[in-house]
């Protein structure tokens, strides 16, 4: 194992997209940001130097950070932000993980432009559990706003309404032609005939679940969220913000240009966004006069396409990669996931959209929770997060009388190495919607999923405890539920939130506090000397 050194200079850069220019916050002047490469067992040191006027923090999404919560990155959860003119070295070792992950800003809405791929290769000499591809390519999906994203969410919070959706989706930073800017170029992937390529697809978009397709090409899924899966073929990948998917593509055509389409999956009646981004799979030697073979994106409410994809995911459960699903459960939790309306005397409408787990709208603390936990600072958080919903619901209906939520910085405490089952239930309040829930510090097993109300008697009997897919971000289906299991083998404070940024801003977040264990390797390490101050 090696030490990989990176330097991230946070700087403003002018970027031109959709036929107009604007200044954006970048790492090293790049959009998308630089790719980090490492191998399993490597230690990675990234010095982040903040040259802009925003506070900054970076999260290494999906890296478990065993005992190194100080390097996890969410602002006010595991660190105070890196202030203008300051720097911080993120220092972590990648233990027992390999695959496609990404890094992104974890403060305000800066993730819109501050993100990049994080590729963890297997240990030297260790092959993939499938034939080695000829080449690998990162395919980073994002969004583009013509206006300033921070202004978009600030205005929304003042008005109490939902913010504007993005103006386009992007594939490696480019949207291809879109309705208001037909000259916008798209990304081109050059390929040779007769090879296998691996695409490492990452959804870094702020607020959009996406469909990914390539005209006339089948995709073989081999990995999600940096865990291998039993390979299966599909025409369409569905990928939520925070998720990654590796696919193999066989370049079986002799030549040609084939459209790559990225379009929104919006499983909610109030959706307004319809813009499809396009890229080109270009076979080498194809004459420029050849027209691109097009593909029609799935309808934005293609729930069956999405369910079919999600239900096909299975972990390898092989000798080399066994599924360690916890079979005995110490904490059986159920959290509702939804949106509500709270009074807001300062808002234009007098009401403000809020979001919650178990009717608690999370309030960000003034100093980070990890320091409060480590130094026993009282008054920052409580550890009384409710383990069950506070009131019964019919989760598939809307019940306006239950719109209001309580506010608090409430955590749920787990003993080191205890096991957790968590049922996440969409409430359909205001509107049913698919919520991609991301847990920091752990991978979890997705043991069950259903539409309608979770039935605590019948549904657990149908859980897959043999080869459930292991991941770090799970879609809670619109008007339905998802059940996950994990072992709390990582001491620290671990954030859990919806990876739709607007929902996080509205309060769809909470954190687990995991106590130290008794063994020498079961405790959080002390904070590094350069940990930023609030
Ligand atoms: Cu990728 Cu807490 O986020």
Image (cartoon, rainbow, N blue to C red):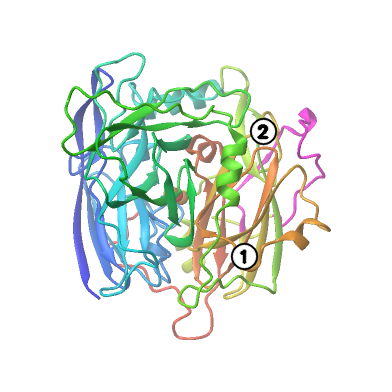
Residue 253: % across, % down: 30, 40
Q: Residues within 10 Å of mark 2 (few under 14, many from 20)?
A: many
Q: Which mark is residue 432?
A: 2
Q: Residue at x 49, y 67 (%)?
A: 492
Residue 58: tell me if it is visible: no
- Above or below residue 498? Residue 18 is above
Query: Magenta stretch: dominant SS?
Result: loop
Q: Position of residue 476 (x, y in %)?
A: 62, 45
Residue that protrudes farthest toward the bottom in the picture? 519
Q: Which residues are magenta?
A: 386-411
Q: Secondary structure at mark 1?
A: strand
Is 454 rendered above or below residue 403?
A: below
List the residue tagged with mark 1.
Answer: 413
Q: Height in image: 340 above or below 393?
A: above
Residue 355 horizontal side relative to residue 295, left or right: right
Q: Is residue 138 left or right of residue 209?
A: left
Gap in angstroms between the C-alphas marked 2 and 1 = 29 Å
């Amino acid at each position: 194992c090696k030490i990989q050194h990176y330097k991230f200079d946070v700087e403003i850069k002018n970027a031109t997209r959709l036929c107009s220019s604007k200044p954006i916050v970048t790492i090293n002047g790049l959009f998308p940001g630089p790719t980090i490469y490492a191998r399993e067992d490597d230690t990675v040191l990234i010095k982040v130097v903040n040259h802009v006027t925003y506070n900054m923090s970076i999260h290494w999404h999906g890296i478990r950070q065993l005992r190194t919560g100080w390097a996890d990155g969410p602002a006010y959860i595991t660190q105070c932000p890196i202030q203008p003119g300051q720097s911080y070295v993120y220092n972590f070792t990648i233990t027992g993980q390999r695959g496609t992950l990404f890094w992104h800003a974890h403060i305000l809405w800066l993730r819109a432009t501050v993100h990049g791929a994080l590729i963890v290769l297997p240990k030297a000499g260790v092959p993939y559990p499938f034939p080695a591809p000829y080449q690998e390519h990162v395919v980073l999906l994002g969004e583009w706003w013509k206006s300033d994203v921070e202004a978009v969410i600030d205005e929304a919070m003042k008005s109490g309404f939902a913010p504007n959706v993005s103006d386009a989706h992007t594939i490696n930073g480019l949207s291809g032609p879109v309705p208001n800017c037909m000259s916008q170029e798209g990304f081109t992937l050059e390929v040779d005939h007769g090879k296998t390529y691996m695409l490492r697809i990452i959804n870094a978009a702020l607020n959009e679940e996406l469909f990914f397709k390539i005209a006339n090409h089948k995709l073989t899924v081999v990995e999600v969220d940096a865990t291998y899966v039993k390979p299966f073929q599909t025409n369409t990948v569905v990928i939520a913000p925070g998720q990654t998917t590796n696919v193999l593509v066989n370049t079986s055509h002799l030549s040609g240009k084939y459209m790559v389409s990225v379009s929104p999956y919006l499983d909610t009646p109030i959706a307004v966004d319809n813009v499809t981004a396009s890229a080109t799979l270009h076979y080498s030697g194809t004459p420029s006069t050849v027209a691109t073979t097009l593909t029609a994106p799935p309808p934005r409410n293609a729930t069956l396409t999405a369910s079919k994809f999600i239900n096909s995911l299975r972990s390898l459960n092989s000798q080399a990669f066994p599924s360690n699903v916890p079979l005995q459960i110490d904490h059986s939790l159920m959290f509702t996931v939804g949106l509500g309306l709270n009074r807001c005397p300062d808002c234009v409408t007098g009401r403000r959209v809020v979001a919650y787990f178990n009717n608690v709208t999370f309030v960000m603390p003034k100093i980070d929770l990890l320091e409060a936990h480590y130094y026993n600072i009282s008054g920052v958080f409580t550890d009384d997060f409710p383990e069950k919903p506070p009131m019964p619901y019919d989760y598939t209906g809307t019940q306006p009388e239950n719109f209001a939520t309580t506010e608090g910085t409430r955590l749920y405490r787990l003993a080191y190495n205890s096991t957790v089952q968590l049922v996440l239930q969409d409430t359909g309040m205001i509107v049913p919607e698919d919520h991609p829930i991301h847990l920091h510090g752990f991978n979890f097993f997705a043991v069950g999923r259903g539409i309608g109300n979770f039935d605590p008697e019948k549904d657990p009997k149908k859980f897959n405890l043999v080869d459930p897919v292991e991941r770090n971000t799970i879609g809670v289906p619109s008007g339905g539920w998802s059940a996950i299991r994990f072992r709390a083998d990582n001491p620290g404070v671990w954030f859990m939130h919806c990876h739709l940024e607007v929902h996080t801003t509205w309060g769809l977040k909470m954190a687990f506090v995991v106590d130290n264990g008794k063994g020498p390797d079961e405790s959080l390490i002390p904070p590094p000397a350069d940990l930023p101050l609030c």
